[in-house]
Image: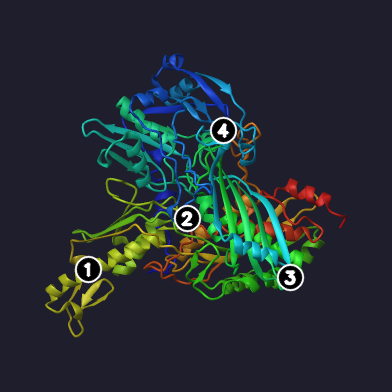
Amino acid sequence: MIGQSLRRVEDFRLLTGRGRFSDDRALPGQLHAAFARSPHAHARLEAVETDAAARLPGVVAVLTAADYAADGMLPMPAQGNPKDVELTNRDGRPVVYPPLAPLAEDRIRRVGEAVAMAVAVTEADALAAAEAVGARYAPLPAAPDAHSALAAEAVPLWDAAPGNLCVDDYKGDAEAVAAAFARAAHVVRIETVNNRVNGIPMEPRAALGEWDAGAGKLTLWAGGQGVNRFHRELCHVFGWPPERIRVVSEDVGGGYGTRNSLYPEFTLTAWAARRLGRPVRWTATRSEAFLGDYDGRDLATGAELALDGQGRFLAMRSTNTGNLGTHAVTFVPIARGPTVMTGLYDIPAAETVTKGVFTNSVPVTAYRGAGRPEATFVLERLIDKAARKTGIDRVALRERNLVGELPYRNALGVVYDSGDFRRSQDMALRLADWEGFEARRREAARRGRLRGIGLANYVETSTGWPVERAEMTVAEDGAVEVVIGTQSSGQGHETALPQIVAHLLGIPLERVRLVTGDTDRVEKGSGSHSTRTMRVGGHLLRQTADRIVAAARGRAADRLGVAPEALVFEEGRFGAPGRNESAGLLELGPLRAVAEIETPLPAYPNGCHVAEVEIDPETGAVRLVRYTAVDDAGLIVNPLLLDGQVHGGIAQGAGQALMECAAYDAGGQRLAGSFMDYAVPRADDLPFFEVAHNAVATETNLLGAKGGGEGGTTPAPAAVANAVIDALGADGPDHIDMPITSEKVWRALRAMPRR
């Protein structure tokens, strides 16, 4: 059953309107919340007047930071520094982690920050009350990007972080890098900003808080990528033991990393329910989502690649400056990306400086790929620039430098355990018909179009927070119940995880019952992120299934009167050679097995993608016309689901390359507040994708899975950008920053010599 393209069992329920998303849940007597938000990006908050709002019809309460503090509530934690690649300051000073106050206290640090929470009988009453809140501000100069925040005249966001520099880290071998650059025959350089993007999941954030006074227990219903993190952070802000708080996450309409965090509105909804003794619900408008959802990317990079006279890569160095936003919600994008900055290539020496900067913008989180798309973009653009400078063919230059023998330790200490990188590149070029491209270019020219092709090799670090737990029980009703902490946000877990269990136990898929998303049932877990579900979850399912089979073997031996070692387990039944009797595993319950993991199980998905574009020289409009992907996700549980993950990832990567940008103006005002301002790919913006797999199982986990959730996104921006530059030709620019909009291309064309 593992390896079969089974259709998603959850689709019928979801497509017939039977999903249970956060906003679908309603409770008797519930109240509605709305928030008064700051119009300023940076200001002193001098006063919040709530009396007029509180007198409006239907209003139950208008709450401020003073009320929050009076109830003994603590700020929310914001200090996501990954322990396996922890960032530190070069000068030895401690890293500053400002607390996250869910309601502004005395300072505003971004547009849209909540200053008051209105709770009323109807949503309309709550919105009216929020609009009636009066706040007095003393505006301060804003710095929405890293460059302006580091300027000498910038006003510090936090007293503990003068100069707005949160972290300044160095990793690498400075001496080896300097020596390599000194003897290099060629050096190419790039300065680029990896554009800020918004996750824009289909389902806006929503939450419902419920207080059970009799039991003394608080429940938060909120969609996310893992309930256990929400639970831990709520326990922290309330100062309560775990048993007093429950978090439930049912169906979730998209995550991409932006739904990993406990947002201020979630905390406030739960707190208001406890304070008022009635259920309180809130659903974000799409404009609120654009204002408050944590963003991705926003990384400024300066990087250099050194080559010898034969085109061999000698060394690489980079300085990466990440815009953290107002808080250090996570360092994952700026910490993990540099560890694979040398990609799939044998680059003997490397060094990287990583800076994280506080700015007057929404915090940046671990958006799909989290640092690896940024690193891949820089490296693959450098290689194309090196090919242009040296005159070596782009494909030949990559082939010459690809890592061959594995395992391989890269210059930053990461060990790639398995894969066949050359075969992936060869497969991608063949499927993309690279050799036939020049004929397609000539045909496009006859139609008045410029056609280009680009490729990008990539490696992913699917590590992620390792804490996970799986429980497997053979129940008396003949079902196998699986409780696990990883949480689906649309990936198809209701199909894939039971598919693994059914395969390992030799039972029908419909006999497996999956339980996730409820902290009353899920004791531990780190949710769904970092391509971890098949890798970590599959590993634990293999462990628990093996233990169930071992326990059942003993019972079957007793029932059949034979030695356990004489039994053969096939298709869910135990039997002995030469005997007609057998015992089914599901008949031997109840049985229970538990497995936990708290150590990383790293794996390195990899592959090669090829993009083809056409450009209208009159308008500069870029159209993606062909796209080929070859990925190594390790063992593949369900090819249909994996292909869907690759398709979605490509769409997100291509969207960032060509159109998406969560921009701010110089005063810190968000320029994209709706889909009228923020462009995302539509169906007719994308071609049909040619997807294939070069699966090499890893031995770092029992299932052999590397994961495929982020592989589509990681190489796509680089492949598309390389194709655009190729289409513009030798007389065109050697780089255009993303998003590569029609205006940028039009200006580049007008600056070129006449064709």
- Give me the C-alpha separation between circle 4 and circle 1: 64 Å
Q: Amino acid at mark 4?
A: Pro
Label 3 vs label 1, nearer the camera: 3
Do the residues under discs 2 and 3 have CB atoms within 8 angstroms?
A: no
Which sits earlier in the primary sequence, circle 4 or circle 1? 4
Question: What is the secondary structure assignment of the residue under circle 4?
Answer: loop
Q: Is residue 636 visible?
A: yes
Which sits earlier in the primary sequence, circle 3 or circle 4? 4
Q: Is residue 555 left or right of residue 347?
A: left
Q: Position of residue 635 (x, y in %)?
A: 44, 69
- Give me the C-alpha separation between circle 3 and circle 4: 48 Å
Classify mark 1: residues with Cα within 10 Å, few (<14), some (14-19) or many (20+).
many
Q: Is residue 146 above or below residue 86?
A: above
Label 4 vs label 1, nearer the camera: 4
Q: Residue 85 got which mark?
A: 2
Q: Which residue is mark 1?
A: 585
Q: Which residue is mark 4?
A: 156
